[in-house]
Image: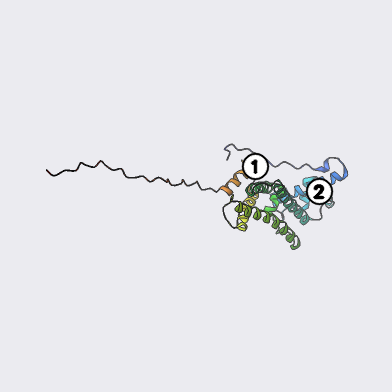
Amino acid sequence: MSTTPRRRTAKAIASPWLAGGARVDQREKKRQAVLQTAARLFNERGFHATSLDDIAEKLHVSKPTLYYYVKSKDDILLECVRTALAMMQEGIAEVRQRGGRALDQLQACMRSYAAIVMDDFGQCVIRIGEDPLPPPLKKELRRLKAGIDHEFRRLIAEGVAEGSLTPCDPKLAAFMLAGALSWVGRWYRPDGSMSPTQIADQGIALLLGGVLAPVPAPSSSIALPKLGRRAPRKTAT
């Protein structure tokens, strides 16, 4: 861990309503700005404590303007969570396409996962979760999460088979690894002393390598007791 604090703050989101541009391009930029602004406010204040008025105020627009891009606050949360899970799925797909040892793929997936849970949308998944959503939407999100969990289990099982991971229950191991990485999304702060890359690197090293110091192997040589010189034998005269 670096001993020199590096202070950072979350970059302000510029309102696309204050700039011109192509109509279709601007519509998508505005929709993304609504989602990212909402995700950041949800993370800072909580879902229930954030209103559409708060989001509109941050973007310097009126509340009715938001309805051109989103249906409701529930819809915003769903889209924020969908965005984060899609990013995770895309990251895993890219890792699979590159191929390589299961261990290398697992580390790459963990690094991608860690980076996303420190992003505005990823933090929204971890800090807000699915509880505020109605049952049909919860079911959809659980399906998306199950796909990510399946990939972690697959890589762990393949790692055990290739001998790069110690024999373990892939289901339990996947829960433990993803759960530990997810928790980063709760305590991470952009103005903290470590960058997202430093956190991901050190966190993954701890999860895969552990915190126990290696035990030195016992010596194979056996120390024999030193024997004194035997006194000369007396002979009969």
Name the colour scheme. rainbow
Above-or-below relation of 30 to 75: above
Q: Is residue 132 visible?
A: no
User: Could you tell me how many numbered marks the image carries?
Assistant: 2
* Res. 92 visible in picture: yes
Task: Tell me the SS state at disc 2.
Answer: helix
Between residues 66 and 210, which one lies in front from this camera angle? 210
- Alpha carbon separation for disc pair 1 and 2: 28 Å
Which residue of the protein is positioned furthest toward the front in this rendering? 237
Amino acid on which the number 1 mark rests in the picture: Thr
Where, quadrant-wise, is the C terminus in this rendering? top left
- Considering every residue shown, the one lying at the far top of the view is 4
Name the residue at the left extreme.
237
Q: Position of residue 104 (x, y in %)?
A: 64, 46
Q: Label 2: how many residues lie within 10 Å, few (<14), some (14-19) or many (20+)?
A: some
**Disc 1 element:** helix
Image coords of residue 43 (percent x, y): 69, 50
Residue beneath disc 2: 31
Using the image as rendered, state which of residue 168 and residue 85 is in the foreground. 168
* Apparent side of residue 199 relative to residue 135 in the rendered image (left or right): left
Residue bearing mark 1: 197
Is residue 62 or residue 204 the one in the foreground?
204
Q: Earlier in the sequence, mark 1 or mark 2?
A: 2
User: What residue is shown at x 78% (from left), y 55% (from top)?
Assistant: 75
Q: Where in the figure is residue 57, as x and y percent of width and height?
A: 78, 47
Name the kind of residue labelled 2 in the image: Arg
Residue at 87% x, 42% y is 22
